[in-house]
Amino acid sequence: MIYANGLTKRYGSFRALDDVSFEVRKGEVVGFLGPNGAGKSTTMRILTCFISPTGGTAKVRGHDVFDNTLAVRASLGYLPQRAPLYLEMTVYEYLEFAAKIRNLDKSKFRQRARTVVEICGLAQSLSKEIRHLSHGYRQRVGLAQALVHDPPILILDEPTSDLDPNERTEFLNYLKQIGRDRTVLLSTHNLKEVEAACARAIIVSRGRVVADGALDEIRAKSGRVRYIVAVQESTGDSPYRGRGNLPRQSEVEHALNNLAGVKKLSELPTDERAHAYELSGEDGQDLRPEIFRLIADKGWVLLELRRDTQTLEDVFRQLTIGDERRNRQLGPVKDERRGGPVADDDDEEEEEEEEDEDEEESSDDSDDDGDEDDKKGKR
Ligand code: ADP
């Protein structure tokens, strides 16, 4: 349903996208993840025909995003980071307007309005002017306009970034409903959201795809598992239930460190009642029996033993840590990907920022012809 092949986008000498390829199949709800500036919005704006790529191709439902923009736009609903709303309209007027530009006749609109109002929880807000709505409700209206023509594909760009925790939970509930019979590409920073709503994720970092697959596959990417082990250090006034004396910290550390399969050991902060450690071992191996045996043989009292595979968050951090480092370095920094210095592209970015604002404005009117001209001019 969504197909991106070798997408590149340059702003001056700055490469915002670098050979991005992926596919989203029918019925999938895919999380599109990446730190700020990774290229998520740029990709989404190419897929929704608001900007053109410098290189590569993209198709939505088989239609090329450059050659067949109307068919692409008709196939999808798009909720940009800031929903394009006319604040002086009431919610109903705005939805009617969105339906009109999508060529829905009155009876079809009334039928669709009932569904989207129910899905998006807007029944009590229909006669309110949009400028009087809270941010969360404005996002609901934005989602409703993206759904009004019943598109088979939805592209949602950080729809929950400014919502409070309750609104977020509600939004995820809508998304689950919507995703039952639609293809959805959802960009977000919130990994919990992805775990709740998506079976698959694509992670981008500095304009490149660094992971693409089922969440379990991505979690397994690090190839490590971790264990949390806590052994009793003191009993306070109660009698000790272990054998011999309570163990010293160095004893526990030494014994765990020498266990076959333990790759790394670090002490965890605890109160004076326990010695606690985080150990890491290879994926595919389970060290819990060995850890338990060791502690039982020593006669120590085991307070906790837990095995965790890596969380999505751990893997996300590992894969995108370069972005954060780069953001904190001054002057030309070494590009770990290419092994050479990176151009100091800040000036170009600023220069191009104006262009971005222009595009942003035209993107508010979905079917702006000027936008098409802009695309053609750039190719
Ligand atoms: P994300 O959505 O992942 O936060 P974006 O796709 O918005 O990232 O941006 C990717 C990179 O491209 C960022 O470094 C951003 O500053 C840059 N960028 C985006 N639009 C423009 C533009 N019009 N001119 C110059 N740089 C831009």
Image: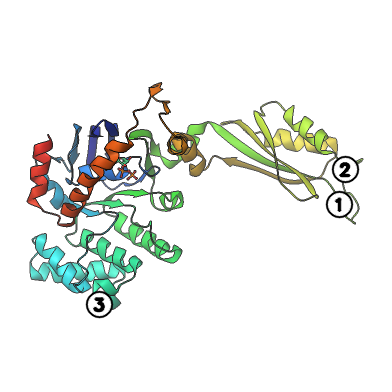
Split into quadrants, the picture shows ligand 1 in the one at top left
Q: Amino acid at mark 1?
A: Thr
Q: Mark 3 or mark 1, which is nearer to you? A: 3
Disc 2 and disc 1 in contact, CB within 8 angstroms: yes
Pick the residue in front: 313 or 196.
Answer: 313
Q: How is the image coloured?
A: rainbow
Disc 2 and disc 3 in contact, CB within 8 angstroms: no
- Residue with the mark numbered 3: 128
Q: Secondary structure at mark 2?
A: loop
Give the mark, 3 or 1, whose residue is nearer the N terminus: 3
Q: What quarter of the picture does the C terminus occupy?
A: top left
Q: Amino acid at mark 3?
A: Lys
Residue 288 can be seen in this image: yes
- For the residues labelled 2 and 1, the Cα–Cα distance comes to 9 Å
Query: Residue 268 appears in which quarter of the rendering?
Result: top right
Q: Amino acid at mark 2?
A: Leu
Give the mark, 2 or 1, whose residue is nearer the N terminus: 1
**Residue 122 on image: x %, y %:** 28, 72
Q: Secondary structure at mark 3?
A: loop
Q: What quarter of the picture does the N terminus occupy?
A: top left
- Residue with the mark numbered 2: 246
- Residue with the mark numbered 1: 235
Q: In the figure, is residue 243 to the left or right of 65? A: right
Query: At x 35% / y 42%, what residue is drawn?
Result: 37
Q: Residues within 10 Å of mark 2 (few under 14, many from 20)?
A: some
Pick the residue in front: 288 or 248.
Answer: 248
